[in-house]
Image (tube, rainbow, N blue to C red):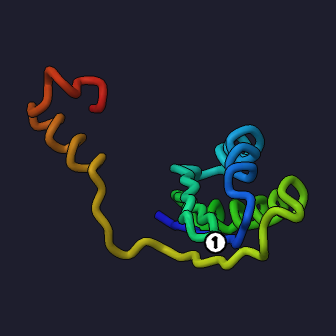
Amino acid sequence: MYISIRKYKTDSAAEVTRRVKEQFLEQVGKVPGFLGYYLIDTREGSLASINLFATKEGAQESNKIGTAWAAEAAAGLLGPAEITAGEVVAGKSWHEQVVKRSRAGHYRQSLSCVA
């Protein structure tokens, strides 16, 4: 799994968030290998996006389209992106544990839709 984190300075977090929801989410979701996208409002004058992909190429593509989208759709609202990207070398997720336990017969009643 590969992750790309883009951080932007902004004084217009609410407007950028609205535009991301209306325009960018569908676009990034079409990138091959897409696993997830999260936009974080730091409440300290910046937004950060976390992009999860199965492949390095997908993460790289998300940086290309994210940077292009920010320059076009959010021109004047965002500063230049600070990008951190790479392969996940260690991690743990809640989802992994739920699926594992569900397959083992736990949560059969309450979380049957997860497995």
Question: On the rendered structure, is 31 left or right of 72?
Answer: left
**For residue 52, side relative to residue 89 (left or right):** right
Residue sitting nearer the eye, 79 or 96: 79
Residue shown at the point (73%, 53%) measured from the top left: 16
Residue 101, given in percent of the width and then of the height, sits at 14, 41
List x then y, in percent, for residue 43: 55, 63
Q: Please identify the quarter of the rendering in which residue 76 is found.
A: bottom right
- The residue singled out by tag 1 in the image is 7
Amino acid found under the numbered disc labelled 1: Lys
Q: Is residue 11 left or right of residue 40?
A: right
Q: How many numbered dots are placed on residues in this image? A: 1
Could you tell me which residue is drawn at 72 percent across and 74 percent down? 81
View extreme (left): residue: 105
Residue that appears at 53% across and 76% down: 86
Query: Quarter of the image holding residue 72?
Result: bottom right
Residue found 10% across the figure and 37% down from its top: 104
In the picture provided, is 67 more to the left or to the right than 51?
right
In x, y percent, where is residue 12?
74, 58
In the rendered image, the residue lying farthest to the top is 109
Q: Position of residue 39 (x, y in %)?
A: 58, 55
Q: Which SS class for mark 1?
A: strand
Classed neighbour count for the residue bearing mark 1: other residues with Cα under 10 Å, few (<14), some (14–19), many (≥20): many
Between residues 104 and 76, which one lies in front from this camera angle?
76
61 shown above or below 101: below
**Quadrant of image for the C terminus:** top left
Q: Nearer the viewer, residue 17 or 84?
A: 17
